[in-house]
Amino acid sequence: MANRIKDGMEKFEKELDRSKKLVEREAVRIKKAVDSSVKQADAYIRKNPEKAVAIASGIAAALGAATALIATHGKKKAKK
């Protein structure tokens, strides 16, 4: 019985190590993709500052409207 537990723990540790390595590789891949996207966005903003401001304003307005809807959701006026 103790041998089965030991074997199970060894298998678990191997799988855990494999999973950690997989996560680390994926994190590096994601970081590279994000860095690339940030560089592309920065280049676009530098070439098109007016469009970038318009896009940012639109996103801010949409987020503000969504926040207002969420904040007021469920708050009904009491009838007198």
Image: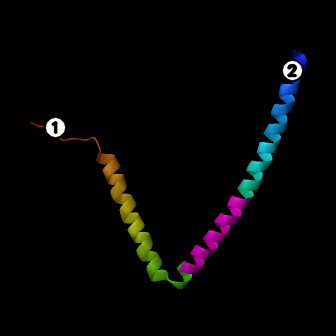
Examine the image and state in which quarter residue 2 appears. top right
Amino acid residing under circle 1: Ala
The stretch drawn in magenta includes residue 4: no
Q: Which residue is farthest left?
A: 80
Per the rendering, the mark at residue 47 is none
Question: 15 left or right of 3?
Answer: left
Residues in magenta, as a range: 29-44
* Secondary structure at numbered mark 2: helix
Q: Would you name the residue on which mark 1 appears?
A: 78
State the count of labels: 2
Q: Quadrant of the N terminus?
A: top right
Q: Earlier in the sequence, mark 1 or mark 2?
A: 2
Residue 51 or 4: which is nearer the viewer? 4
Q: Is residue 79 above or below residue 57?
A: above
Q: Position of residue 29 (x, y in %)?
A: 72, 60
Query: Do the numbered discs 1 and 2 sit on residues whose CB atoms are within 8 Å?
Result: no
Front position in the image: 16 or 34: 16
Q: Main secondary structure of the magenta part?
A: helix
Q: In the figure, 8 relative to 39: above or below?
A: above
With 43 as the anchor, is 49 left or right in this view?
A: left
Secondary structure of residue under mark 1: loop
Q: CA distance from mark 1 to mark 2?
A: 66 Å
Measured as percent of width and height from the top left, residue 62 is found at: 37, 62
Q: Which residue is mark 2?
A: 4
- Residue that lies at the very extreme toward the right in this rendered image: 3
Q: Is residue 74 shown left or right of residue 35?
A: left
Give the number of the mark in front: 1 or 2.
2
Q: Residue furthest bottom?
A: 47
The kind of residue tagged 2 is Arg
Is residue 41 rendered to the left or right of residue 29? left
